[in-house]
Structures are given as structure tokens and as C-alpha cells.
Image: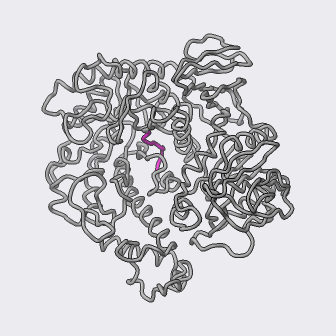
């Protein structure tokens, strides 16, 4: 077979996590797996993810022969390997001999051995043992033609907590991190506002990590601790990457976890060659599938946005998970639809956890391609095999394409952390949920969106939307000012521009008062006692969350509050600035308001769905395009997805080609429930 690399595979990767180390006493299982993988159209698997004890059964004694035999057998059968570093779970010999490798919790108690990612990222022993193992893996397999990339650890930080270790080594590392950042205690005390409650620090050694047994109400300290935890975990991961690259030129990735609060994925993206993530939507859990589908689309779009390139869906379930309180099977068709949704949003792979179910421990009932019994004679296996054939058909048209949005939304991890810690008007405020609410109407319109953080570039976009942009980092306001002045459209909301990147409130004017043309005053939550609405273009829309009281200072008022003492106050404003414009949405409203408002903005900016179609509720579109060197789009591929529980009919207003069949389609198109049609310009 030809030499391939992850990220330049030449097709859509189809496969998943394979754990043959659990079946080494039954060699016939491997032979059966090889046969079944070919029947399921699997072309790649991930190996070694939690296999440390098999690879190093005793300290300093390595056994890689079994792994090499499996990689070679897979390769001979046309199946490539993404090889993992197995540091997500430590062997018992390591934790029993070196207690310092295990984390200490926020109460100062060291964890027992077990679970995943229970390691201290500051431990020299843990770092050295990891380096030794990873280096030897790279020496042995870094040039094997069947290995296409490195999978660094697994779901880093995912141990049921916040991923933090509070041991003495981590406390010392935190203090050193603070000294490097602030330079002096005077600067630190000013940034943390420690004069409050007489918490001023006079010696670096007085500073500890935030803890329920001590200080956890200094917001600047909490924010810096979260930054440190993220930085220390990235530094540990960086050492793993350095070890595998000592004897390998293969690309590296690690499987991210949607909007995982602990780790700032915009910073993690800088360490990775390829972005990958694990997607486990809770399908069939509500009145319909649309909120779940929209939330999943947000996460896929985030992963694509991290590098503005296709990503890999590293894990998904072909059937069911086992860790929710209620674990529902995917209904017929949903596996194909949810997998193609990932492709539609920019993935170049569909992979599963897991290939074969294990017989014991906590994940024995987690879904897999191969069940405990019945082999290929299962509904799940047939659906996986059918999807594999579809992926082979569409791959030549999809590989080399990517989504190229003209709209960006600002999602910033540090602002998220600060919002959760604010102790302000609504302490139940869910930054991520509000973000999804602002994303969903665009998704329903069939318009793709990129995500950027406050350090990201805005110049490539026509519209930038920043809901609950609570924190303004240094330089962000000037970046927005320049974007609007050059002709951009900036949309933001109440509770934006409240604090700086030390979590200190701004005083005086709003940092973007000149751009927005408003003056902010108060913030409220009309919950039950004082229900309110806003009137926009003759229609009243119910307020569902925060609402700010603002005054127009040059801005045009487009909507007003209808009730209570702030009746007549501006609820939506528009302000011309330079060659562009800005909008300020003063309240969080029901979805119909955003659909009406966004619809107007999209029409004015010429940013409507590129597929000429009249959509119905629950049917959405994503577009991937191929671009020539001169920047011209040379082919556009649309994924038309029906997330309804019944068939839906759309009206195509131009002629298109069905990518899978080559047929021409136009006019009335019926989509059965949970299906996806892949179309190209006819």
C-alpha cells in the first residue's frame, strides 16, 4: 500500500478505537476482526490508547512485539493505524512505586490510584517515565508504513474533575508562573484587587491554589489558576509531542471534548498538527432532535475553526453510550445522519469508540461496531458498513474541500471562566448555552459559522457576532474598532465589555461606546415578577434572560422594551461607524427575534445560504467548497440534512447533482427522516 499520513490520507478515514491488548489470549479474535473490518469498510484504527501496562509490564521492561504484529497484520489487510501514547491511564506498578505521580485534590488529599488522567503534570517522575515510553514507541514505529499519525494520550483532563493537581510541586509551579507573568507582588495585588477583605500578599509563598479550604473568592486568582492549569497540562502534552517527534515526522493530534471547560482549545490547537474530537450527542432526548443537532453543529464548527481546516471525528458511538443516566439507542438512520453531519461541518473522518465491546469494567456496555455476540449479524454493524460504502463514494468529491464561512462568532474560554465566577445578576447564566442560542438561527438558515477567540483575526469575515462578550482582553476593543471602520458588521449583546483580562471591571464609558453608539447603565433579569418583551418591526418577542438598560448616544433605535419601568428603552440599536456598522442587542430574547434580525442582516450583506432551496423546519444545509490557488471556488458540495423524526420536503430552485448517484435533481425533493443528501452544482 502507499505511504499515507493522517491529515493527508487521500480519503475519508473510517474506523475507530481498537483494543486488541484486551484479547491477546484469544488470537482468533484478531483474525475475526480483520475480516469484519473489511466488511465494514474500515480503513484505519487507533491503537494503544490505554495499553501502558501491556507495553511496559514492569518498570523499564518493554514489550512491543505484540503491537508490531497487529500493526503489520492490519497494514497487510489495507488498514492503517493511528498510534496513541498510552499515558491516559497509569499502570499499577508506577502509582504504587511513585506516589507523587498521582494528583492531589483541592482539599490537599492525594488521590488513590486508578481512573484516567490521575497524574500530576508537574511530577518529574511522571514526565520522565512518559518520555522514556513515548521515545521508544517512536523509535519502533515512527517509520512503519502502516502508521499514519500520533494520538497523544486520550481526552486530556477528562477525569471527572477539573484536571487540576494541588500538590506542593504544582503550588510551586503556580507561584513561578505568577512571578513570570506579573514580575512583582505589587503588580499581582493590583491585578487581583487584593485590598478587598485585606487579602494583600506580601510574599510569593503566601499564594496557594484556590481551594474550598482556603481562598476561592478572589476572581483574578481563580482566573489565573485556570490559566495555569491549562498551561501546565499543555506543557506536559508538549513534552509528549517532543518525545514522539524525536524519531518520527508523523503528524500529531489529541482528541478534544467539545466545549471542555478546563482546557482552552484555541491554545491547544497551536500544539497540534491536526484537530480531532470526540462527539457524543444525546439524540432522542427531547421533544425533537433540533437542539441536539444545533449544539453538535456548534462543536463541529469550533473544531474546524481552530485551524480553519478539516478536522477528524476521532470518537463517536455507532449505537449507544453507557455513562448517562438514560442511554438510548440511535434510531435507524441517525448513525448515518449524525456521521454525515460531522463530514458536512468539516470532518475528514468518522471513527468510533469502540470497534469491539470489552467483556468487563465500566465500558462493557458502551456501544461498539462489534457486539458481545452475533458478529456482523446486527443492525449496528449493517449501518456502519453501509455508511462506510457511502463515505467511499463521496470521498473523491469531499477530500480537499472545507467550509469557508463569512461569519464568525466570538467564543473565548477565559471570558467563559470569568462569567462563571462573576457572582452578578444571574448566577445560573450559562455562557455556552447562550452561545448555542445565538448560533442556532444561522444554522437553521443554512449558513456556516466560524468560531474565534478574542486573540483571533477578524479581517476574513463580513460579520462578527459576540454574545455575552463579558471580558475584553487587551487590544480586543481596538481590533473590533478597526474591523468595523473598514466595513465590517459587529453584533454584540448586553453584559459585554464588563471586565478586563484581570477580571477587573471597566470604569467610565463602555470600551466600545464610540463604535456601538450607546451608554450602558443597569442589567436585570425579568424572571417571573416582571415579564417583558421587545418590539421589533411590529412583532413582540418575549425576553428570556438578561436585559440591559442602555441609552442611545448617536445609535439608531430599532427595537424597544414594551413593559415595566424600562418601557421605551432601546432593546436593539444600530450605529454607523467608519465604513461599517455595529448592532447592540440589549436583551436575550426568544429565538424568533434572532431569526428576524439575522434574516435582515444576511440579506443586506449577501450572506444567505448558497444552496438555492426553500428549507422547511428541521432541514439544514452545510457547504464545503474546493478553492483554486487564485482563491476562486471551483466546486461547491452541499449536505442537505433532515433531522426531523418524519419525512420532509424541500424545494430545490436550481438543478443539482446527487454526488452519490450522479443523478440530476431539481424541484421537489423528499428526504426521509434522519437522512442526508449530498449535492453538487449540476
In percent of width and height, residue 430 lies at: 54, 54
Task: Evaluate whether residue 432 shows in this view.
Answer: yes
- Is 181 situated left or right of 29 in this image? right
Task: Evaluate whether residue 624 shows in this view.
Answer: no
Spot the residue most to the bottom: 202
In percent of width and height, residue 310 lies at: 54, 38
Q: Is residue 546 above or below residue 393?
A: below
- Is 432 situated left or right of 569 in this image? left
Q: Is residue 197 above or below residue 373?
A: below
In percent of width and height, residue 631 lies at: 71, 36
Q: Chief secondary structure of the magenta span?
A: loop
Residue at position x 68%, y 20% in the image: 681
Q: Is residue 429 above or below residue 174?
A: above
Q: Quadrant of residue 477?
A: bottom right
Residue at position x 40%, y 32% in the image: 351
In percent of width and height, residue 50 lies at: 26, 45
Q: Is residue 275 magenta?
A: yes
Spot the residue most to the top: 663
Q: Quadrant of residue 606?
A: top right
Near-viewer residue (309 or 296): 296
Near-viewer residue (357 or 219): 219
Residue at position x 67%, y 51% in the image: 543
Look at the image and give the residue range highlighted in magenta: 272-279
Q: Is residue 131 magenta?
A: no
Q: Quadrant of residue 248?
A: top left
Amino acid at each position: 500500500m502507499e505511504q499515507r499520513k493522517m491529515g493527508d490520507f487521500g480519503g475519508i478515514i473510517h474506523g475507530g478505537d481498537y483494543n486488541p491488548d484486551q484479547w491477546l489470549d484469544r488470537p482468533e479474535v484478531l483474525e475475526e476482526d480483520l475480516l469484519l473490518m473489511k466488511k465494514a469498510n474500515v480503513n484505519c484504527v487507533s491503537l494503544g490508547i490505554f495499553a501502558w501496562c501491556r507495553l511496559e509490564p514492569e518498570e523499564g521492561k518493554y514489550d512491543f512485539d505484540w503491537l508490531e504484529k497487529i500493526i503489520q497484520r492490519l497494514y497487510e489487510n489495507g488498514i492503517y493505524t493511528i498510534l496513541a501514547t498510552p499515558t491516559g491511564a497509569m499502570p499499577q506498578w508506577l502509582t504504587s512505586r511513585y506516589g507523587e505521580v498521582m494528583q492531589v485534590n483541592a482539599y490537599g488529599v492525594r488521590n488513590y490510584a486508578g481512573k484516567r488522567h490521575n497524574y500530576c503534570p508537574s511530577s518529574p517522575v511522571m514526565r520522565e517515565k512518559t518520555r522514556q515510553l513515548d521515545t521508544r514507541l517512536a523509535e519502533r514505529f515512527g517509520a512503519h508504513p502502516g502508521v499514519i499519525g500520533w494520538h497523544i494520550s486520550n481526552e486530556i483532563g477528562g477525569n471527572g474533575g477539573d484536571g487540576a493537581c494541588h500538590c506542593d510541586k504544582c503550588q510551586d509551579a503556580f507561584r513561578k508562573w505568577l512571578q513570570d507573568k506579573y514580575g512583582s507582588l505589587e503588580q499581582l495585588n493590583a491585578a487581583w484587587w487584593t485590598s478587598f477583605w485585606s487579602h494583600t500578599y506580601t510574599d510569593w509563598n503566601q499564594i496557594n491554589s484556590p481551594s474550598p479550604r482556603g481562598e476561592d473568592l478572589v476572581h483574578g486568582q481563580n482566573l489565573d489558576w485556570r490559566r495555569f492549569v491549562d498551561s501546565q497540562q499543555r506543557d506536559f502534552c508538549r513534552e509528549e509531542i517532543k518525545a514522539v517527534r524525536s524519531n518520527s515526522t508523523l503528524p500529531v493530534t489529541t482528541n478534544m471534548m467539545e466545549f471542555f471547560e478546563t482546557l482552552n482549545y484555541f491554545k491547544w490547537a497551536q500544539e497540534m498538527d491536526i484537530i480531532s474530537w470526540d462527539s457524543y450527542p444525546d439524540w432522542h432526548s427531547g421533544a425533537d432532535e433540533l437542539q441536539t443537532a444545533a449544539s453538535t453543529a456548534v462543536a463541529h464548527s469550533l473544531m474546524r475553526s481552530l485551524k480553519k481546516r478539516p478536522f477528524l471525528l476521532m470518537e463517536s458511538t455507532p449505537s449507544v453510550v453507557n455513562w448517562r443516566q438514560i442511554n438510548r439507542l440511535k434510531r435507524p438512520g441517525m448513525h448515518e445522519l449524525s456521521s454525515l453531519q460531522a463530514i458536512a461541518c468539516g470532518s475528514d473522518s468518522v471513527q468510533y469508540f469502540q470497534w469491539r465491546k470489552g467483556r468487563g469494567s465500566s465500558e462493557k456496555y458502551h456501544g461498539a461496531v462489534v457486539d458481545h455476540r452475533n458478529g456482523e449479524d446486527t443492525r449496528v454493524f449493517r449501518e456502519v458498513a453501509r455508511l462506510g460504502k457511502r463515505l467511499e463514494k463521496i470521498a473523491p468529491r469531499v477530500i480537499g474541500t472545507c467550509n469557508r464561512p463569512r461569519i464568525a462568532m466570538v467564543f473565548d474560554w477565559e471570558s467563559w471562566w470569568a462569567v462563571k465566577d462573576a457572582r452578578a445578576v444571574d448566577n445560573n447564566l450559562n455562557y455556552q448555552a447562550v452561545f448555542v442560542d445565538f448560533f442556532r438561527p444561522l444554522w437553521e438558515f443554512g449558513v456556516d459559522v466560524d468560531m474565534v477567540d478574542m486573540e483571533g483575526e477578524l479581517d476574513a469575515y463580513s460579520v462578527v457576532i459576540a454574545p455575552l462578550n463579558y471580558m475584553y482582553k487587551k487590544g480586543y476593543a481596538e481590533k473590533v474598532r478597526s474591523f468595523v471602520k473598514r466595513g465590517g458588521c459587529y453584533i454584540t449583546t448586553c453584559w459585554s465589555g464588563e471586565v478586563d483580562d484581570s477580571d477587573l471591571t471597566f470604569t467610565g464609558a463602555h470600551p466600545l461606546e464610540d463604535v456601538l453608539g450607546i451608554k450602558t447603565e443597569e442589567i436585570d433579569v425579568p424572571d417571573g415578577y416582571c415579564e417583558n418583551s421587545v418590539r421589533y418591526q411590529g412583532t413582540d418577542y418575549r425576553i428570556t434572560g438578561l436585559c440591559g438598560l442602555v441609552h442611545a448616544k448617536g445609535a439608531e433605535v430599532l427595537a424597544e422594551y414594551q413593559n415595566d419601568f424600562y418601557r421605551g428603552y432601546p432593546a436593539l440599536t444600530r450605529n454607523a461607524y467608519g465604513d461599517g456598522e455595529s448592532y447592540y442587542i440589549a436583551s436575550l430574547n426568544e429565538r424568533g427575534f434572532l431569526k428576524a434580525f439575522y434574516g435582515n442582516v444576511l440579506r443586506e450583506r449577501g450572506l444567505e445560504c448558497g444552496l438555492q432551496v426553500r428549507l422547511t423546519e428541521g432541514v439544514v444545509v452545510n457547504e464545503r467548497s474546493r478553492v483554486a490557488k487564485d482563491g476562486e471556488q471551483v466546486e461547491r458540495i452541499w449536505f442537505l440534512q433532515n433531522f426531523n423524526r418524519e419525512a420532509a420536503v424541500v424545494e430545490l430552485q436550481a438543478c443539482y447533482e446527487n454526488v452519490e448517484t450522479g443523478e440530476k435533481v431539481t424541484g421537489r425533493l423528499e428526504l426521509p427522516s434522519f437522512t442526508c443528501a449530498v449535492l453538487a452544482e449540476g
